[in-house]
Image (cartoon, coloured by chain):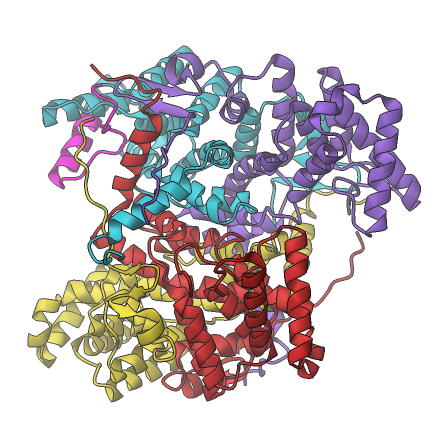
Chain colours: A yellow, B red, C purple, D cyan
Amino acid sequence: MARDRKPLRSDIAWSTATRIVVRGKDLPDELLGRVSFGDMAFLEVTGRLPTAAESVLFNAILVTLVEHGLTPSALAARLTYAGAPESLQAAVAAGLCGLGTVFVGSMEGAARMLYEALPRAQASAADAPVLDGLAHQVVAAYRARGAAIPGLGHPIHKPVDPRALRLFELAGANGLAGCYVELMKRIGAQAERAAGRALPINATGAIGAICCEFGFSDRIVRGFGVMARAVGLVAHLLEEGERPLALELWHRAEEEATAHVRPAEG
Amino acid sequence: MARDRKPLRSDIAWSTATRIVVRGKDLPDELLGRVSFGDMAFLEVTGRLPTAAESVLFNAILVTLVEHGLTPSALAARLTYAGAPESLQAAVAAGLCGLGTVFVGSMEGAARMLYEALPRAQASAADAPVLDGLAHQVVAAYRARGAAIPGLGHPIHKPVDPRALRLFELAGANGLAGCYVELMKRIGAQAERAAGRALPINATGAIGAICCEFGFSDRIVRGFGVMARAVGLVAHLLEEGERPLALELWHRAEEEATAHVRPAEG
Amino acid sequence: MARDRKPLRSDIAWSTATRIVVRGKDLPDELLGRVSFGDMAFLEVTGRLPTAAESVLFNAILVTLVEHGLTPSALAARLTYAGAPESLQAAVAAGLCGLGTVFVGSMEGAARMLYEALPRAQASAADAPVLDGLAHQVVAAYRARGAAIPGLGHPIHKPVDPRALRLFELAGANGLAGCYVELMKRIGAQAERAAGRALPINATGAIGAICCEFGFSDRIVRGFGVMARAVGLVAHLLEEGERPLALELWHRAEEEATAHVRPAEG
Amino acid sequence: MARDRKPLRSDIAWSTATRIVVRGKDLPDELLGRVSFGDMAFLEVTGRLPTAAESVLFNAILVTLVEHGLTPSALAARLTYAGAPESLQAAVAAGLCGLGTVFVGSMEGAARMLYEALPRAQASAADAPVLDGLAHQVVAAYRARGAAIPGLGHPIHKPVDPRALRLFELAGANGLAGCYVELMKRIGAQAERAAGRALPINATGAIGAICCEFGFSDRIVRGFGVMARAVGLVAHLLEEGERPLALELWHRAEEEATAHVRPAEG
């Protein structure tokens, strides 16, 4: 039990009576009114402000992830709000809890797949033949174990996901379409050929690849989905307050799901 | 049980095979690369894009709320992440759950206080004497029931909260310092005089007042804190992954808290 | 900043290499195999084991609260699980977040109402005429401000809530139907007379009253609902894994809610 | 988009104006006052009431999991409660979010390991030599890939975990110590021999093995930890309300963690 005491240390922010400093910048003087919310997110996560080109692309990633309609996540938030309208924060939290491996995790999966195929230290040396060879290996490996390639395919957006097209276009225009974007495209093309059907790179595949261009750890990629969706969930809760649908959904589900055992009432 | 079926309806977004539309705008064509994350948040919540002046101020509000150091919320997120590092989203959710009446709720309280004193329909007619009278009434009412006025006072930032100063400065420079900002300032001044001690308008007081200038419902004001803090929590979890402190905090707390009953081990 | 350091202290449990002690009892020797889960919950919360009579009633309270069908809370948990099946704990957490003022809070409200009308120190002196008078005052006060009395009325279980009847019966049979149960019954009867329609004491009203008989703080009453519902939510997630309904619910909601703006696809 | 509509169905519970039925049993008549909270949990999850022997063991599992002191989970709940005391349910939810792969997941891992080594269909034919062989294979496989065997070893409870001893004793006394308990013991013994150091079966290893004896899906095993800990977290929040430690923990952490950058105040 004679445990060594380890120091606690955080480098994100500090404050005194007169100063509030975040990532080395004075919050009132250097950030408020000068830095947008998206650029502040970049500063928080990386410790520096983005370049103009990085800002365009990083904001585009977050904007892509804000809103996806009445998702399971949005419905969970609305159903929670119906029971605890005094705790908007807990309703957002409930909605975020579902951003796991099924819906948002594929961004992380795509980034991890790309980093594993092409470690960052080797990225600068990857020319077209190398990328083709890596794409071939990746597709073959996933097909051999019957696994879906993260970031490819979409149940609705076919034959292309217009968000992925636009994100890659923005990456190119801002000098951030390097070997990871190229590798993702080649994986998509070879996977389509091998599968014999449309397998568009989807939004999460494009975002995963661009996150590799930024050099973000794959561990944090899911976090961009979480921060963006928090924004979207607040909007859903505002609408739920004005035009509720959660309780109707509940009553319908309850009635239908128990009709097979519930006796008719006389 | 012959329940009337009510329609389900949401006006936030829709999509088809080829289109994704959020708040009436085509996501790839009209939003990606054109709209910042902060402006997207404004669009989500209000249904329209902000003006340039509104954008500056709205982004400043969100930037203010991103990061407050190793708060209880950040610690809860880090402790959760230590147990479930595979669920970053749940760690953010845990952190958000604590943004209730004690820490973030005062923004909402300030907005509600201001709207109750000066309903929006009467705001245009409120001149200086009217505002002085309202401030007097508000301060008297809170003092009569011994309640703290939301948005005033700060345990650390004394005698002024530099964020509030800066936010009001930005509101003025962007034409958004109207009668609610004025009313908040007068409430602060009269409360200081009545209390006989420094009671600076704090960041949440300034934000509450500016939210009234925007015309935001007080119900949604807390949501701005939630979306901004989601960003900050992701940064804390990234740091926790690289420089952990949660487990050390746990061991220290456990050892100290049970030392009075735990027998020494021989 | 020269802050006084306050000690950290917890009296619930401690452990060493060879011992694990909860509420003063050796976990392996004195609790495992000897104490039921419900009695352990009583021990955790109160610091002592229940009497046999208390055990019957306390377990009955928890059993009442385990399962209420496909509630908004159960649906939120299932929708969360659909997105993050690797985090069962987060799906339960999402379901719990909605146990707020609308659905479970009325237990707490009933307990608070009863304690406010009849503080514990005066409970022993409350005879029938006193209770009648208190009930009259309570009903009159709620009616005067147009508020619903917590613990009365139910949308489905009319004219009586069979759970409340049974809980009161058990309270009587176990010597725990004292002045708070009496007061609740009188409030129910007087409220029905005043309203001119059926206003049965519902399960949360009965539980609120019985919690007052136990002397539980009204602050913790909601916690019984939370612990019991955690059990029920795990069962819903097990069923969701075997017979899923969350994704179907999502697709239906999305389709219907956006049909008014989504163009037909050609 | 011409989607097939799938039916919604749940078999857990139903209710009408006069009846509330859970798992085929009338809640007021057949469960309240007759069934303990732990047995109700068994009914919820399995669809039947436990035998007397099963009841002892199932309750012992849950009792084991209720309380582990000031864990990261308990601290997260307390820190959340400090910010949102009006949402006890959200504080419990925050605490549950951390019951992931690091702390509670090992129960699930142990059950999965045992089922994979010995599928249920083959369990009846597993005699001592077969079990020895399986244990040998399991230990060799984990050692070959340098992975920790789930359910073995404990940072504090050495050389034995008294909870595991007691749980196995109870399993034997109640006729539920079959081939999975045997296999777990053999894995533990062989792993100790191979490692050359104490590797006691811990509480989660014992629970994982006993869950296999019950025939529970490994997917649901974590759920027992979640339901039990919900009880413990409510007790921690009650104590936090009476003897708070969260804010002190926050102030200490904040001060220490930022001391390296925060200037001294003059």
Residue that sits furthest to the left in the current view: A125
Instruction: Work out whether residue A242 can be spotted.
Output: no
Number of dots carrying numbers? 0
Span colored in magenta: D133-159
Q: Looking at the image, which residue is at 41% across and 62% down?
A: B229
Q: Is residue D28 magenta?
A: no
Residue C236, image quadrant:
top right
* Percent of width and height locating residue C140: 86, 43
D73 vs B175, nearest the viewer: B175
Instruction: Work out whether residue B243 can be spotted.
Output: yes
D99 vs D146, nearest the viewer: D99
| Left or right: residue B16 compared with residue D135 | right
For the C terminus of chain B, give its image quadrant: top left
Q: Looking at the image, which residue is at 57% across and 50% down?
A: C98
Location of residue C243 with respect to B131 vertically, above or below? above
Residue D108, image quadrant:
top left
Q: Looking at the image, which residue is at 69% across and 42% down?
A: C106
* Percent of width and height locating residue D37: 57, 26
Q: Is residue D151 magenta?
A: yes
Location of residue D185 with respect to B105 vertically, above or below? above
C248 vs A38, nearest the viewer: A38
| Left or right: residue C174 compared with residue A52 | right
| Left or right: residue B69 compared with residue B48 | left
* Percent of width and height locating residue B191: 57, 62
Q: Looking at the image, which residue is at 36% across and 57% down?
A: A101
Residue B5, image quadrant:
bottom right
* Percent of width and height locating residue B30: 44, 87
Location of residue D120 with respect to B29 vertically, above or below? above
